[in-house]
């Protein structure tokens, strides 16, 4: 049995369908992420799991039990908000033990749990400090410690890392992964940042306008997006309007305006004459100067239009004769060399016959 089951949950705010028949099963010990653009319904779903809001229809079950009549404080669930919401006038120790001091816990139980938590969260020496005396990462750890002190079965994290700068965010991500696997507590993590979702999660649910588009492991989501929205939202991708010229087992021949014919892997349901979008990841596109790409089924001539140097990799935008622009991402493995190709270089680009995905309309 799944630990948490969302069963056909729908929620309307006036005319707005914030959640549209959402079904999900989350297993014990999973690091599960709800990923989607701002306004797609992530917080709304999280608030219902926590009990701050209720579905118009559908059910939320925890360990098989419908939560409809369980008030938030009775649910074995805790939420960490984006702002951490630490009490500014309380010390680290007081913040962490707040929930215990409100409950029926003995002084010795409170001390024991605080001690263990301080050690686990590497907050030794910080117990008497106030939130304004802490770094962003320490505040984050105090917020987590406070959430975990009552040992909830389920931790909900709503954009919890959004306020951190890039470097610290990466550090906290690693901590969060370690902490989650150590504790074995189920995390339901909400983010609009796809790289964060890919880095942290066992599984990800991609949401769009109140609906679930795909639920999968990160590498499946990235490698086998089920539709155009997921392909475009998770990672970067080139998207080209295309039409099926020929559909044979395992292979499609597509016509792409401005490029001519290309060969693509077959989608089970694609028929001759169908229109749609051919999508290919920038790291699947290769660039050559001479005829080193001639062995590839798909190759085209163009000119480098722009180069975006990113240190470890560079993104090259190549303009083909008819104006189509294709992005390629190449590693910068030779140190000290900013770019492999220069703007206005005449190049060939190409990709393998089995690269890319066609999504019909
Ligand atoms: N209490 C509310 N009243 C009216 N509209 C709301 C309310 N809460 C959320 N919404 C709307 O529902 C949609 C989903 O919101 P939300 O769940 O906060 O999105 P996300 O967390 O994915 O950014 C948004 O369009 C938002 O404006
Ligand atoms: Mg939100």
Image (cartoon, grey):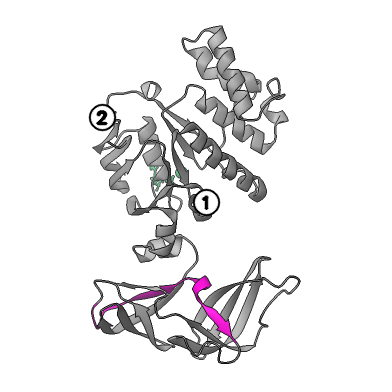
| Quarter location, residue 171 | top right
Instruction: Identify the residue position indicated by label 2 in the image.
Output: 66
Front residue of this view, candidates 301 and 44: 301
Q: Going 55% across and 13% down the picture, which residue do you hit?
A: 110
283 falls in the magenta region:
yes
Front residue of this view, candidates 104 and 180: 180
Q: Going 31% across and 44% down the picture, which residue do you hit?
A: 24
Which residues lie in the magenta part? 271-288
Q: Going 34% across and 62% down the picture, which residue do you hit?
A: 226
| Figure check: 209 above or below 88 | below
Front residue of this view, candidates 281 and 101: 281
- Image quadrant in which the N terminus is located: top left
Q: Quadrant of ligand 1?
A: top left
315 falls in the magenta region:
no
| Quarter location, residue 12 | top left
Callout 1: helix, strand or loop? Answer: helix
Instruction: Identify the residue position indicated by label 1 in the image.
Output: 199
Image position of 265 (left or right of 107): left
């Amino acid at each position: 049995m799944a630990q948490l089951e969302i069963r056909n949950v729908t929620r309307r705010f006036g005319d707005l369908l914030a959640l549209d028949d959402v079904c999900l099963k989350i297993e014990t010990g999973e690091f599960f992420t709800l990923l989607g653009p701002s306004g797609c319904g992530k917080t709304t779903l999280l608030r219902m799991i926590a009990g701050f809001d209720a579905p118009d229809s559908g059910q939320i079950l925890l360990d098989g039990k419908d939560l409809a009549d369980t008030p938030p404080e009775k649910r074995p669930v805790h939420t960490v908000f984006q702002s951490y919401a630490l009490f500014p006038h309380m010390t680290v120790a007081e913040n962490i033990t707040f929930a215990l001091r409100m409950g029926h816990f003995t002084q010795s139980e409170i001390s024991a749990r605080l001690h263990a938590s301080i050690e686990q969260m590497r907050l030794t020496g910080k117990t008497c400090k106030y939130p304004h005396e802490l770094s962003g990462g320490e505040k984050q750890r105090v917020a987590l410690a406070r959430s975990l002190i009552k040992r909830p079965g389920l931790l909900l994290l709503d954009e919890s890392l959004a306020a951190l700068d890039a470097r610290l965010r990466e550090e906290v991500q690693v901590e969060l992964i370690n902490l989650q696997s150590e504790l074995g507590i189920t995390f339901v993590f909400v983010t609009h940042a796809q790289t964060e979702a890919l880095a942290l999660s066992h599984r990800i649910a991609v949401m769009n306008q109140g609906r679930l588009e795909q639920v999968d492991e990160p590498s499946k989501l990235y490698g086998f997006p089920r539709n155009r929205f997921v392909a475009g939202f998770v990672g970067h991708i080139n998207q080209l309007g295309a039409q099926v010229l020929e559909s044979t087992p395992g292979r499609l021949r597509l016509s792409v305006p401005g490029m001519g014919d290309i060969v693509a892997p077959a989608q089970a349901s694609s028929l001759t004459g169908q229109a749609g979008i051919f999508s290919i990841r920038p790291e699947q596109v290769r660039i050559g100067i001479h005829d080193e790409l001639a062995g590839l089924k798909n190759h085209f001539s163009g000119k480098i239009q722009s180069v975006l140097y990113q240190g470890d990799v560079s993104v090259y935008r190549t303009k083909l004769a008819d104006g189509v622009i294709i992005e390629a991402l190449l590693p910068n493995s030779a140190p000290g060399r900013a770019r492999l190709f220069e703007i206005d270089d005449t190049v060939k680009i190409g990709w393998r016959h089995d690269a890319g995905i066609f999504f019909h309309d």
